[in-house]
Image (spheres, rainbow, N blue to C red):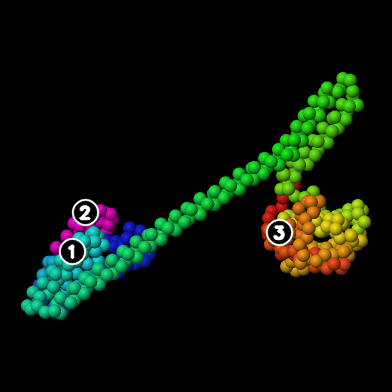
Amino acid sequence: MDTTAPALTPATRALAWCLHLLVVTLLVLAGARAVADGRPDAAIIVVAAAVFALVYAAGALLPGIRRRRRAAVWWLVAMAAAWLVLLALSPDGVWVAFPLYFLQLHLLPRRAGLLAVAATALAAIIALAGHRGSFSTALVIGPALGAAVAVAVVWGYQALYRESEQRRRLIEQLTATRADLARAQHDAGVLAERERLAREIHDTLAQGLSSIELLLRAAERALPGGPEAAVDYVGQARQAAVDNLAEARRFVAALSPPALAGATLAGALERLCATTSARHRVTAHFRVTGTPVPLPTAHEVALLRVAQSALANTVRHADATTAALTLNYLGDHVVLGVVDDGTGFDPGQPLPRRSEDGGFGLAAMRARMRSIGGSLSVESAPGHGTALAARLPLVTRGADEPEADS
């Protein structure tokens, strides 16, 4: 018989086996003492103990006893009858009352179990008094104390079990809530991404394809009377198709900057310096220190954007003649530095907003670096140029993301 809660655990199984062992030990003790004392009814006592053991074992082997209360009641009645016979024959049978307390409290409702325990304790006290031929307070203490301990242990265990079940249900609810929240966040992210792609496609591909359709229609109308105009329309349509094909490839490439397509970060920065020197009155130099390693695409994009913005600010506002751009691989970090000899400014003072900056000022550069775990520092003073440093943890691409498909 399992005296545990419906959900068996290793601990409750161990308790059940301890109870089985206790019953067997007490029955063997009762039979052994009867034989050792040379009692004339020792054989009958041994048979009574064996009958009780068989009744107990039958309940332990029948799974229906734990699941059906009526079967459990009949099993308890049979054990009580066998125990009363053993108790009438030997005073040592009184100790079997202790495991009976646990079974009654576990298998019966609380009130019925308490009444069964009280009746069992009373029977044990009366039987002890009959065997000894006298009544004393000591006869009451043993069975009564055993009954009180059993009630306290079983009710305490049941309270702990109820609390454990409440916690288990709470954990299941929290787990289900987290799963629902994760699904909701995933769905929201999918919807937001769909909306973003819909806007991008509407503003680029859809508009471009519409222009192609209109240009080709105009070419059809112009062909009979103006082949030169038709050729012009077709050329415009072809250029629109090329532009929109590039847009489509940009979406597929996860919006990677064209400057990084098929090139290293150092190569893109070197071309940026060359382009800046060719188009503006600023001589930009580029230098790499340390051992270059491939970075995650998001890190390369962030460093390239910061370099573009920093050189753009140098050209527009610093009135500088030279700018030095360095890419330093420093063990566990990579640092992008941009230094110019321009007019400088006071970093402690708020800078005026300029619409031509496109909204990508120092605050935006700092936000971009923070979003990927980096930092941005600026040192400058009026009349002493500006030094900007963008610092990122050195994480290789293979450890962060897979290579993009070509």
At numbered mark 2, what does the secondary structure look like: helix, strand or loop?
helix
Query: Looking at numbered disc 1 in the image, what kind of residue is underneath it?
Result: Leu
Closer to the chain start, of discs 2 and 3, is: 2
Dot in front, 2 or 1: 1
Amino acid, disc 2: Arg
**Could you say which disc has been placed on residue 367 in the image?**
3
Query: Pointer 2: what residue?
Result: 70
Q: Residues within 10 Å of mark 2 (few under 14, many from 20)?
A: some
Check disc 3 and give the amino acid type: Ala
Q: Quadrant of residue 134?
A: bottom left
| Labels 2, 3: front one | 3
- State left or right for residue 257 relative to residue 57: right
Give the structural element (helix, strand or loop) at label 3: helix
Where residue 328 sits, quadrant-wise, is: bottom right
Element assignment for label 1: helix
Report the side of 169 relative to 378 (left or right): left
* Residue 80 sits inside the magenta stretch: yes
Residue at screen point 92% across, 56% down: 281
Real-space CA distance between mark 3 and mark 1, rounded to the nearest whole angstrom: 73 Å
- Which residue, given by chain and number where applicable, does mark 1 sit on? 115
Task: Tell me the magenta residue range.
Answer: 56-82
The Cα atoms of the two marked residues, 2 and 1, are separated by 17 Å
* 283 inside magenta stretch: no
